[in-house]
Image: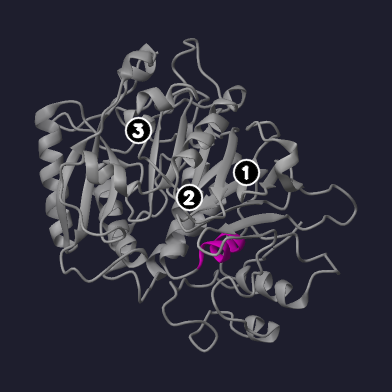
Amino acid sequence: MRAVSSTDDEGMPVSLLDGYSTTPAQQGLYDPQFERDACGVALVATLSGVPSNDVVKQALTALENLEHRGASGSEPDSGDGAGILIQVPDALLRRVSGIELPEPGAYATGIGFLPTDGPARDVLMAQIDEIARDEEIEILGWRHVPTDPSLVGVTARECMPDFWQIFAVDARNATFGLDLDRRAYALRKRVENELGVYFASLSSRTMVYKGMLTTDQLTPFYLDLSEVDIASTLALVHSRFSTNTFPSWPLAHPYRLIAHNGEINTVAGNRNWMTTREAMLTSDVLSGDLTRLSPICTPEASDSASFDEVLELLHLGGRSLPQAVLMMIPEAWENNPDMDPSRRAFYEFYATLMEPWDGPANVCFTDGTQIGAVLDRNGLRPGRFWVTDEGLVVLASEAGVLDIDPQTVVRRDAFNQVACSSLTPPRAASSKTTRSRLNSRPNCRTTSGWTPASSTWRNCPNESTSCTPTNLLRVGSKPSGIARKNSG
């Protein structure tokens, strides 16, 4: 099967998937909007807080051991997708980029999927630079990411982009870390929406290597992953099985914040609700007219990609990552008499602002400072996690992804829901690398930095500033008169 490519008059892609995907256009009974994923996922982190090459290597080993959870087509060497998300490998990039980089956290970087045609690529880079100047971002330079496509199958190679890594800073030298990521987010969204250029990530905190690969192709394909000075305190890996779908370079996981095992069966409604909210978005931390970032959900993206895009908006809009995750993936709270009243109030309040993204789904998430996982309330994508006496944390969609000496394991548990008359709440594991601790159930009352009384949540249907910090992204509540069924 050859890749389907739609281009403009200059031969450049006009959407994120055009040219880099085997997905055909809608035809007959086939409609790409109904595509879903079912995959293998794992995370590896160290509670020491010290970046190491071992964490990256262990994550890549776990990925290779998830090979049976991925898939390929008629060509065994054209995979559905594989990838890894790590912290920005600052030591490696300083050595190989040829660019004088500022201190870690003061620059954003990520890999762009650009055309293989040189003149078309140069035009796009110039246009990206123009958008960056408009967003008050300075592009320090580009690096051609070294790859070895010799192992990649014909189908994947025919739609393979050229990989270029961008390095950008705040032109005013005024933002750092998360604040810089907010500015980089605006740049990336505009580049995606206006130019149709996909970036696997663009952040001061994390970096993604991924593609239309099999699990054992990822490491030899991206030569960076074999370098001894690529290091991280955490890593998230994913092996894609595109159930009843077509593979694509951009739709491989991980995305910017998540990797996902399962599917989002409510995604059509979720996307429609998000579209209705776009005109009502306001923020004190995401600068400028937010309509320039629309559409938030890329029309041709997968269910997982749409989930990631909304989660990214909520997180960069001022919420902690665990809080944003719990807003989108609530527990089965309505009919659980044993739930803490404050936690129930949290879910009841946010049910007026965000409808559940229901799976079955096992979502692993990270922003580069903390890493965790959560099940949706259906609980049908279980997993397991382990903690060793050396502070190694491993969570995966199945046992056996790493060969861990049982004598070193100080904690292990199933990561699942129990199917019974009263469903147990989904368990979540969250590890903050800077605090060196594991929290098996983050407290939704404190994930955003304040602890409201349960009545306070319920009495603020519009998330007014009297109830919440003023820097949060604010969205209009659902239109009145629409029934809200928040939990099954």
User: Would residue 259 be found to the left or right of residue 130 on screen?
Assistant: right
Q: Which residue is drawn at 19% across and 38% down?
A: 143
Residue 212 in the image: above or below residue 479: above
Pick the residue in front: 143 or 38.
143
Percent of width and height locating residue 290: 32, 66
Instruction: Kindly indicate the quadrant of the structure image that contains residue 107.
Output: bottom left
Label 2 vs 3, first from the N-terminus:
3
Label 2 vs 1, first from the N-terminus:
2
Q: How is the image coloured?
A: one colour
The magenta stretch is: 320-327
Residue 429 in the image: above or below residue 382: below
> Does the stretch in magenta take in 323?
yes
Pick the residue in front: 465 or 165.
165
Whether residue 476 is visible, yes or no, is yes
Q: What residue type is labelled 2?
A: Thr
Q: Residue at x 18, y 68 (%)?
A: 173
Q: Circle 1 sits in a helix, a strand or a loop, which is it?
A: strand
The residue at which mark 3 appears reads as: 227
Pick the residue in front: 137 or 485.
137
- In the rendered image, which quarter contains the C terminus? bottom right
Real-space Cα separation, disc 2 to disc 1, in angstroms = 12 Å
Which label sits in the foreground, 3 or 1? 3
Percent of width and height locating residue 47: 57, 55
User: Would residue 131 be found to the left or right of residue 466 on screen?
Assistant: left
Q: Residue at x 50, y 10 (%)?
A: 74
Q: Which mark is residue 394?
A: 1
How many C-alpha atoms fall within 10 Å of the one at disc 1: few (<14), some, or many (≥20)?
A: many
How many C-alpha atoms fall within 10 Å of the one at disc 3: few (<14), some, or many (≥20)?
A: few
Q: Circle 2 sits in a helix, a strand or a loop, which is it?
A: loop
How many C-alpha atoms fall within 10 Å of the one at disc 2: few (<14), some, or many (≥20)?
A: many
The residue at which mark 2 appears reads as: 233
Label 3 vs 1, first from the N-terminus:
3
